[in-house]
């Protein structure tokens, strides 16, 4: 790994390692504790009161590091914007829930409207300030691209919002979203370096920030990232994929995000259609395995290994 990649990883890692012991006690004093669903796995009840909104640490690590490189690597700006933009939406949701003590946080409509606004600004910037083509590389096909023409922007909205919410659903076990996303970020880093895309400082910053945050977030977690972190990570994944022209690779490298959100859609739809029957023991999918007897650590390990293998397959599908 060259110096241009190593330094952002180290800087963001150090920022998060330093901020963790400062931010976590502060969150405890604010009493911004997580409220665990009583109908979920009983082992989760002991997590009640664990500080959430720890995604603030991740955002400081990513932003603090990326801004050091922004002048020399201007292509990281839209990636950083979408990451921080969705992080802000998540922060508002967390703040309303745990600080203002309104259990629902942002309403679904409010959250969706804010996500559309952030995505709209991002799309406008790409179209009017970067001149970047929105054509997507087709996996496993040499020099084949998919271009939706006038539908590129609506497709972008769908991909970004679907990815963000899939990542959000993945954040339900200690270290799960962080472990999966650090592997996905490593994949993007490898591609960014190989294609000389110019976004490697931000992808490396995410790797370092997540490694630092996982020191406090692995089981048993002393802090949760909350929507502040999970929505930000979804924004990062979507923006990095677009910067590298790899949105069609998201279902491969982000397969865990996909199956998590699909499991929720199937569960809710089947429940309403059948009048109360369920496909899974509980959704999102990670809870299904937990209720089947898997430990949190096993679910995280299996989902992370699956992601690593799929990222290797995706690298083969690049054919660069």
Image (spheres, rainbow, N blue to C red):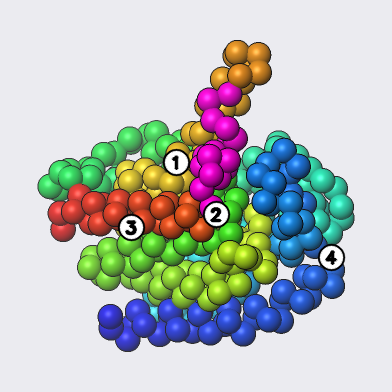
Q: Residue 66: say if magenta.
A: no
Q: Which residue is mark 1?
A: 258
Q: CA distance from mark 3 to mark 2?
A: 18 Å
Q: Determine whether the residue tagged by mark 3 lies in a helix, strand or loop.
A: helix
Which image quarter: residue 40? top right
Q: Which residue is mark 4?
A: 31
Q: Residue at x 42, y 37 (%)?
A: 155
- What quarter of the picture does the C terminus occupy? bottom left
| Mark positioned earlier in the residue sequence (4 or 2) | 4
Where is 236 relative to 200, above or below? above
Residue in front for this viewpoint, 186 or 48: 48
Q: Which residue is mark 3?
A: 308
| Mark positioned earlier in the residue sequence (4 or 3) | 4
Q: Determine whether the residue tagged by mark 1 lies in a helix, strand or loop.
A: helix
Segment tinted magenta in the rendering: 278-295
Q: CA distance from mark 4 to mark 3?
A: 36 Å
x, y percent for residue 57: 63, 72
Q: Which one is closest to the eye, mark 1 or mark 2?
A: 2
Q: CA distance from mark 1 to mark 2?
A: 19 Å
Residue in front for this viewpoint, 48 or 3: 48
Where is 16 relative to 241, above or below? below
- Side of 51 where 16 appears, left or right: left
Q: Which residue is mark 2?
A: 296
| Mark positioned earlier in the residue sequence (4 or 1) | 4
Where is 142 relative to 198, above or below? above
Q: State yes or no: discs 3 and 2 in contact (Cβ < 8 Å).
A: no
Q: Residue at x 74, y 63 (%)?
A: 50
Which image quarter: residue 90? bottom right
| Mark positioned earlier in the residue sequence (3 or 2) | 2
């Amino acid at each position: 790994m060259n110096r241009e990649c190593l330094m952002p990883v180290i800087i963001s890692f150090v920022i998060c390692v330093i901020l963790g012991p400062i931010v976590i006690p502060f969150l405890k004093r604010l009493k911004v504790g997580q409220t665990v669903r009583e109908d979920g796995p009983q082992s989760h009840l002991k997590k009640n009161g664990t500080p959430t909104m720890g995604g603030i640490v991740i955002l400081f690590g990513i932003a603090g590091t990326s801004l050091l490189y922004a002048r020399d690597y201007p292509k990281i700006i839209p990636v950083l914007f979408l990451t921080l933009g969705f992080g802000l939406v998540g922060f508002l949701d967390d703040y309303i829930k745990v600080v203002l003590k309104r259990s629902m946080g942002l309403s679904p409509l409010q959250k969706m409207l804010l996500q559309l606004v952030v995505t709209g600004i991002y799309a406008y910037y790409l179209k009017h300030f970067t001149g970047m083509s929105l054509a997507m590389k087709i996996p496993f096909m040499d020099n084949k691209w998919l271009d939706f023409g006038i539908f590129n922007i609506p497709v972008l909205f769908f991909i970004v919002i679907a990815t963000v919410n899939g990542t959000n659903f993945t954040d339900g076990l200690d270290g799960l979203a962080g472990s999966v996303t650090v592997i996905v970020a490593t994949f993007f880093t490898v591609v960014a370096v190989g294609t000389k895309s110019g976004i490697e400082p931000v992808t490396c910053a995410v790797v370092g920030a997540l490694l630092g945050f996982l020191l406090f977030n692995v089981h048993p977690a002393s802090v949760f990232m909350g929507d502040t972190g999970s929505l930000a990570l979804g924004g990062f994944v979507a923006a990095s994929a677009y910067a590298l022209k790899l949105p069609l690779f998201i279902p491969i490298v982000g397969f865990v995000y996909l199956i998590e959100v699909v499991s929720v859609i199937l569960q809710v739809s089947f429940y309403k259609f059948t009048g109360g029957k369920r496909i899974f023991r509980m959704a999102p999918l990670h809870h299904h395995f937990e209720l089947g007897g898997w430990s949190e650590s096993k679910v995280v390990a299996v989902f992370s290994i699956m992601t690593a293998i799929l990222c290797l397959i995706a690298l083969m599908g690049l054919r660069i």
